[in-house]
Image: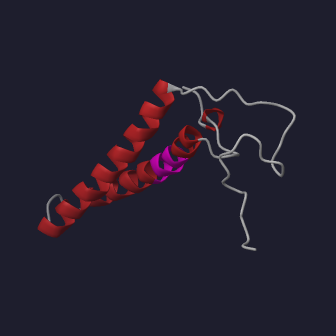
Amino acid sequence: MAYVDHTFSIFDKDIMMETSYSINNVLLVKEVALVVSLFVFGLVGIILDSFMTYNRIGDDRGIFFVILGVVLFILGFYYTRIAYYAYKGYKGFSFANIPPM
């Protein structure tokens, strides 16, 4: 018999992960839009810095874009992942884990 990992189970009747309370898992449009915009602006900042560094534009200004891009990308990726898993219904993930605006 094969080993089955129930960590990312999407079934409601999971015996191992059953809890006595329910989490209100409502899609928060403003928060998800903020999270996706952080991800996109971080990615754009990293790409813009790569372009500026390759063409040697702006001397030391490129370091600003790389720092800003990396910070925005990390935060955006982390919360986008949480929003995606909450949307798909994985156990342990909910839209309540995304900070409110």
Residue 87 as seen in the image, left or right of residue 21: left
Residue 93, image x, y percentages: 65, 43
Q: Residue at x 16, y 69 (%)?
A: 54
Residue 24 as seen in the image, left or right of residue 52: right
| On screen, residue 52 above or below 25 | below
| On screen, residue 57 above or below 3 | above
Q: Could you tell me how many numbered marks the image carries? A: 0
Residue 62, image x, y percentages: 26, 59
**Is 6 within the magenta?**
no
- Relative to the observer, which residue lies in front, 98 or 13? 13
Residue 29 as seen in the image, left or right of residue 56: right
- Relative to the observer, which residue lies in front, 2 or 82? 2
Q: Residue at x 69, y 44 (%)?
A: 11
| On screen, residue 48 above or below 2 | above
Residue span colored magenta? 74-81
- Which residue ends up furthest to the front in the rendered image? 1
Q: Residue at x 34, y 58 (%)?
A: 66
Residue 12, image x, y percentages: 72, 40
Tell me where residue 2 sits by quadrant: bottom right
Q: Quadrant of the N terminus?
A: bottom right
Q: Quadrant of the C terminus?
A: top right
- Relative to the observer, which residue lies in front, 15 or 97? 15
| On screen, residue 66 above or below 94 | below
Residue 38, image x, y percentages: 41, 42
Tell me where residue 24 sits by quadrant: top right
What secondary structure predominates along the stretch shown in magenta? helix
- Which residue ends up furthest to the right in the rendered image? 20
Q: Residue at x 73, y 30 (%)?
A: 23
